[in-house]
Image (spheres, rainbow, N blue to C red):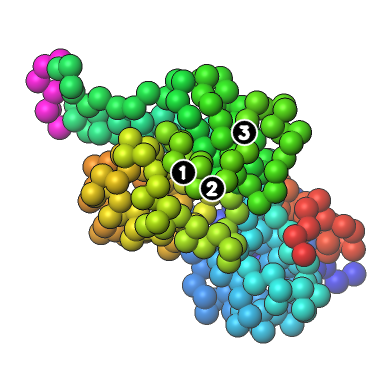
Amino acid sequence: MVRPKVYITRKIQDEAVARLSVTCDVSMWNEENIPVPREVLAENIREMDGLLCLLTDTIDEAILTNATKLKVISNYAVGTNNIDTAAATKRGIIVTNTPDVLTEATADLTFALLMVTARRIVESSDHLRKGEWKTWSPLLLTGMDVYGSTMGIIGLGRIGGALAKRAAGFGMKILYHNRSRKTEAERNLGITYVELETLLKESDFVCIMTPYTPETHNLIGAAELSLMKPTAVLINTARGGIVNEEALYHALKNRTIWAAGLDVFEKEPISASHKLLELPNVVMLPHIGSASINTRNKMAEIAVENMSRVLANQPPLYQVN
């Protein structure tokens, strides 16, 4: 019996590779911190039945042209904007993802980023490490209150709902905007639906939880930032490209808004010369929303299970197209 051939675009957990190797012949780009070069991916995908990829891999029409045998693309992520799903569907290729499992870890990171940004934790730590702490002062590194403030959530999916539960524990008033109202969630979570403009005007913390789509590209630009309070904080742990980074830079520099916390960027990874890094009122993280050990292990497990099921002519756990 001919075993399916699978290509993995980055070094992942040994247990996941071993599980896949039971039924498949597995090849892998065996680097942890270096993405597979595009030309290497294009060459290796030619004879593959399955592709297990990361959100850093662009699987577009040009790559798929080489994929003459490909049956499944298993994305090690919940978002699939790195994959041309329409092109895959046209070729009869199933696209899968890993939702649900990263909900709580990402909600944790979002609220942590909110608190770190609001209370200037990174600035404070740097202040101490640089030997600049000379005395206690009433105005030293004062930040914004979290407890009792107003949170605005843009996009009430799984992670947005989980974030609302955390905000409730801090006595926050919670507003949300979504493409459709969720009345059951409103009752269960004690949250209020408002239009986007109202959310931006009234929120102390604006948290972006919406997926990246053509409709949400540059959803938050100069006009939207100008509606926010000068004491407001913008948090984005969803996807880069939803916030216009040029507009955000000017809003932060000119103190149109008070601060921002970002885990995602339009082009990743960003360089050390990224202009947002010049500003003291922004906290920036290297896309670690789901980076807990248990969550990443579970993501690998689901990505492998999705792959194995499709190659065994069974429905995957999570199918996108």
Q: Secondary structure at mark 1?
A: helix
Residue 297, visible in the rendered structure: no
Q: Which residue is mark 2?
A: 196
Residue 152, visible in the rendered structure: yes
How many numbered marks are there? 3
Is 2 rendered above or below residue 14? below
Whether residue 238 appears in magenta in the rendering, the answer is no
Q: Position of residue 159 (x, y in %)?
A: 62, 40
Q: Which residue is mark 1?
A: 200
Position of 221 with respect to 312 (left or right) is left
Circles 2 and 1 in contact, beta carbons < 8 Å: yes
Mark 2–mark 1 Cα distance, whole angstroms, equals 6 Å
Q: Which residue is mark 3?
A: 192
Quadrant of the frame with the C terminus: bottom right
Position of 317 with respect to 140 (left or right) is right
Label 2 amino acid?
Leu
Q: Magenta segment, which residues?
A: 129-136
Mark 2–mark 3 Cα distance, whole angstroms, equals 12 Å
Label 3 amino acid?
Thr
Label 1 amino acid?
Leu
Quadrant of the frame with the N terminus: bottom right
Q: Secondary structure at mark 2?
A: helix
Disc with the residue nearer the chain's start (3 vs 1): 3
Mark 3–mark 1 Cα distance, whole angstroms, equals 14 Å
Residue at point 70%, 60% (across, down): 74
Position of 241 with respect to 233 (left or right) is right
